[in-house]
């Protein structure tokens, strides 16, 4: 969850966008919950040297469904600052 006056977390931002889309599409609550659930979320952090300065990036991989391969999901990378 977010604190007052701060930006939403990555997950909060994604949930907000998904909730808006579900509302516009008028999906049943059961279908909406099935779409929103994740089978797995992996978070990694790794350093990258850019113009002589080391930046630490955080990456996420969320897998939403593995009933058909390749699995569905997405990747997001965010810089340290």
Image (cartoon, rainbow, N blue to C red):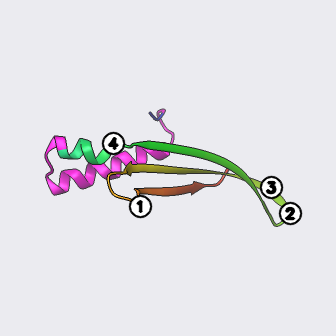
Mark drawn on residue 52: 2
Per the model, the C-alpha gap separating discs 1 and 2 is 38 Å
Which residue is drawn at the image coordinates 26% and 52% (left, top)?
Answer: 20
Q: Which residue is mark 4?
A: 37
Q: Earlier in the sequence, mark 4 or mark 2?
A: 4
Q: Which residue is mark 3?
A: 54
Q: Which is more toward the observer, 54 or 28?
A: 28
Q: Position of residue 37 (x, y in %)?
A: 33, 42
Q: Residues within 10 Å of mark 3 (few under 14, many from 20)?
A: few
Residue 11 among those drawn in magenta = yes
Q: Is residue 7 visible?
A: no
Q: Are marks 1 and 3 in contact (CB under 8 Å)?
A: no
In the picture provided, is 57 more to the left or to the right than 26? right
Q: Quadrant of the N terminus?
A: top left
Label 3: state its secondary structure: strand
Q: Which is more toward the observer, 15 or 66?
A: 66
Instruction: Give the foreground label among 4 and 1.
Output: 1
Q: Earlier in the sequence, mark 4 or mark 1?
A: 4
Per the model, the C-alpha gap separating discs 4 and 1 is 18 Å
The magenta span reads 3-30
């Amino acid at each position: 969850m977010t604190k007052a006056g701060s930006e939403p977390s990555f997950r909060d931002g994604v949930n907000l966008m998904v909730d808006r889309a579900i509302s516009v599409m008028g999906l049943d609550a059961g279908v909406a919950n099935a779409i929103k659930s994740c089978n797995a979320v992996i978070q990694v952090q790794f350093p990258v040297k850019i113009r002589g300065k080391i930046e630490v990036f955080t990456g996420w991989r969320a897998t939403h469904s593995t009933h058909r391969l390749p699995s569905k999901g997405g990747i997001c990378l965010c810089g340290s600052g």
